[in-house]
């Protein structure tokens, strides 16, 4: 009979490795919210100034071109994507590429809109859809980084520079951790609670000049709810891109986002954020490569995320178990970690194969990852 595994002596300093909401920035305390304009109107000059500051710092940190518009919109990244789909699609054929749960949601939305010329390209978990099939005369909808499966596009080379259609990109777990090819992207969406670990509920919508032209020259056949309306009398509602919002935002959340953006800028901006995420992903990857009980869900390193790293059980006798039994084993492992206050919320996404999903974005501290992996080995030994 083998002896029980030995419990590690040191725990990660911060046990937060969830893929959403993601960890707060290092050094964060509630004191950073002291400057929030609580009890004030978001329509007041001071409130609008805070919102405008969030837009301006977003542009600076993400290196967004000066002629792209940026707005703060309701309902997180989901609301931003829905706003784009409902407002822009229907003018021409549409290609939707889906390889994770969120991409699949956009595919279902496109079907619900009963679009003519709709083509759906899907891939199973761990793989990517055939991007070569993208039609430059179609609008294209895709997720840059699939949070639920850990699959990301290798680049934007598959998007035609001379396309006539628009590209609508859900970039919520790529923004602040991966380089986005802005000239290839017409609509980009993301949320505050991913890359920078800010408070949730608000989304960001970034529009190219081509997307603005579509909004001003095309009107969908279906009615648009108020929270989706980006134009007024046939013209872009410019106020939305200068600190005005469609509904009431939380100025407490705005303050938190401003703090995170300030932290990102203090590090050196986007390149520094990407370097942190890449280093974290390499650390976790080195452990995976030398550990026989775990493996990447995504086999091809070229399409493997550096933020949401998705892992599956790899021991042959375990990998062959029914999904329910594998999930039960993972649940036991997670219980060990949570009770020891080592890691929270790192189980695989509910629609993905049973396994782990560990966030390695820029707000994760590199020294915590080797400590986490030691505990993962220990917890698996107990659960196994």
Image: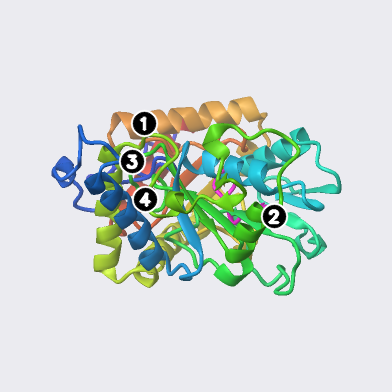
Is residue 197 on the magenta stretch? no
Q: Badges 4 and 1: C-beta atoms under 8 Å apart?
A: no
Sequence-wise first label, 3 or 1: 3
Residue projecting furthest to the front? 233
Residue wearing tag 4: 243
Q: CA distance from mark 3 to mark 1?
A: 27 Å
Residue in the foreground of this view, choosing between 177 and 35: 35
Sequence-wise first label, 4 or 1: 4
Q: Residue at x 68, y 40 (%)?
A: 104
Task: Mark 4 vs mark 1: give the one in front.
Answer: 4
Task: Mark 2 vs mark 4: give the one in front.
Answer: 2
Residues shaded magenta: 142-150
Local secondary structure at mark 2: helix
Q: Residue at x 72, y 34 (%)?
A: 222
Sequence-wise first label, 2 or 1: 2
Crowding near pointer 3: few (<14 within 10 Å), some, many (20+)?
many
Residue wearing tag 3: 199
Residue wearing tag 1: 336
Q: CA distance from mark 2 to mark 1?
A: 57 Å
């Amino acid at each position: 009979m083998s002896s029980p595994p030995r419990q590690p002596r040191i725990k990660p300093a911060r046990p937060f490795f969830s893929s959403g909401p993601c960890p707060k920035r290092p050094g964060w305390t509630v004191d950073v919210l002291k400057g929030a304009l609580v009890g004030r109107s978001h329509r007041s000059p001071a409130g609008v100034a805070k919102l405008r500051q969030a837009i301006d710092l977003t542009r600076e940190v993400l290196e967004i071109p000066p002629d792209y518009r940026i707005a703060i919109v309701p309902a997180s990244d989901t609301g931003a994507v829905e706003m784009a789909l409902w407002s822009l699609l229907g003018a021409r054929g549409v290609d939707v590429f889906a390889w994770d749960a969120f991409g699949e949601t956009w595919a279902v939305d496109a079907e619900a809109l009963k679009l003519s010329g709709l083509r759906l390209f899907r891939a199973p978990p761990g793989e990517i859809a055939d991007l070569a099939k993208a039609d430059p005369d179609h609008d294209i909808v895709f997720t840059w980084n699939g949070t639920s499966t850990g699959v990301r596009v290798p680049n934007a080379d598959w998007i035609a520079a001379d396309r006539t259609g628009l590209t609508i990109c859900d970039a919520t777990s790529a923004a602040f951790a991966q380089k986005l090819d802005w000239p290839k992207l017409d609509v980009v969406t993301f949320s505050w609670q991913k890359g920078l670990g800010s408070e949730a509920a608000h989304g960001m919508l970034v529009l190219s000049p081509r997307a603005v032209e579509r909004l001003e020259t095309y009107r969908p056949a279906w009615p648009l709810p108020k929270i989706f309306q980006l134009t007024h009398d046939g013209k872009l509602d410019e106020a939305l891109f200068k600190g005005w919002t469609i509904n009431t935002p939380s100025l407490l959340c705005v303050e938190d986002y401003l703090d995170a953006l300030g932290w990102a800028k203090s590090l050196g901006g986007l390149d520094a954020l990407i370097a942190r995420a890449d280093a974290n992903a390499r650390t976790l990857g080195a452990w995976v490569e030398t550990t026989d009980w775990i493996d990447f869900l995504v086999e091809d390193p070229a399409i493997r995320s550096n933020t949401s790293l998705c892992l599956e059980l790899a021991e042959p006798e375990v990998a062959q178990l029914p999904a329910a039994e594998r999930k039960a084993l993972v649940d036991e492992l997670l219980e060990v970690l949570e009770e020891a206050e080592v890691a929270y919320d790192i189980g695989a996404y509910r629609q993905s194969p049973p396994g782990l999903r560990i966030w390695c974005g820029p707000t994760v501290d590199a020294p915590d990852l080797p400590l986490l992996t030691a505990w993962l080995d220990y917890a698996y030994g107990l659960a196994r």
